[in-house]
Amino acid sequence: MPNETLARRYATAVFQLAQEAGKIDTVQGNLHDVVRVLDADQNVRKFFRSPVVDRKEKEAIVAQVFSTLDPIALHTVLLLIRKRRENMIEEIVTQFDVLERAARGARPLRIASARELSKGELDAIVARLSTAFKTTFDVDQTVDPALIGGVRIILGDVQADGTVAGRLDDIARLLSTN
């Protein structure tokens, strides 16, 4: 696993540059585009991460392929190549997202349910949590039929499990201890 602390340093530097230029959304989108391109093709990923490919050659090819990127995002990718830190791109993007979310004052919120929640149901849950915690959230909704019914809410390290599967697990634990 790449060094999270080092990735955070790179992400902080890139975020500050993007913030000063007023291009946070553009740079963030460009960095996500780079990661998507690398994830889309195994050969591209191997080329990008390969330590045996000449750095100058790799820089030239990457600069040509990603020439439409914002200069901040492009130079970030090229710097990673020069410093032989290509394998850190995903973690840097993750850390950039954390910084962007913090700058907006938002927190991540994961909501899992047995079925797809309607927009009204989801909005009602998020509105109650926003009022209770006095913050905004970036919501990630997932569907897991194994939950049987109900909703599981994960906010940072705190989990509220209101699912049928969670209740059945609680009952099974209670019965096994007696």
Image (cartoon, rainbow, N blue to C red):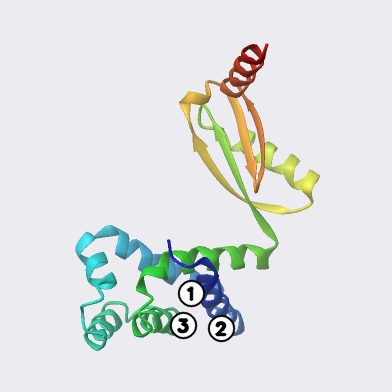
Residue pointed to by mark 3: 72
Query: What residue type is disc 2 on?
Result: Leu
Callout 2 crowding tier (Cα within 10 Å): few <14, some 14–19, many ≥20 = some
Q: Residue at x 30, y 83 (%)?
A: 63
Residue pointed to by mark 2: 17
Contact between marks 3 and 1 (CB within 8 A): the answer is yes
Callout 1 crowding tier (Cα within 10 Å): few <14, some 14–19, many ≥20 = many
Q: From the viewer's perspective, is 160 left or right of 13? A: right
Choose between 120 and 110: the one closer to the eye: 110
Disc nearer the start of the sequence (3/2): 2
Q: Position of residue 170 (x, y in %)?
A: 64, 20
Depicted 45 relative to depicted 131: above or below:
below
Disc nearer the start of the sequence (3/1): 1
Depicted 95 relative to depicted 113: above or below:
below
Query: What residue type is disc 1 on?
Result: Val
Question: Residues under labels 3 and 1: Cα distance?
Answer: 7 Å
Q: Position of residue 36 (x, y in %)?
A: 35, 61
The quadrant of the image that shows the N terminus is bottom left
Q: Residue at x 37, y 65 (%)?
A: 35
Disc nearer the start of the sequence (2/1): 2
Residue pointed to by mark 1: 27
Q: Element under label 1?
A: helix
Question: Residues under labels 3 and 2: Cα distance?
Answer: 7 Å
Contact between marks 3 and 2 (CB within 8 A): the answer is yes
Q: Residue at x 65, y 40 (%)?
A: 123
Q: Position of residue 103 (x, y in %)?
A: 67, 68
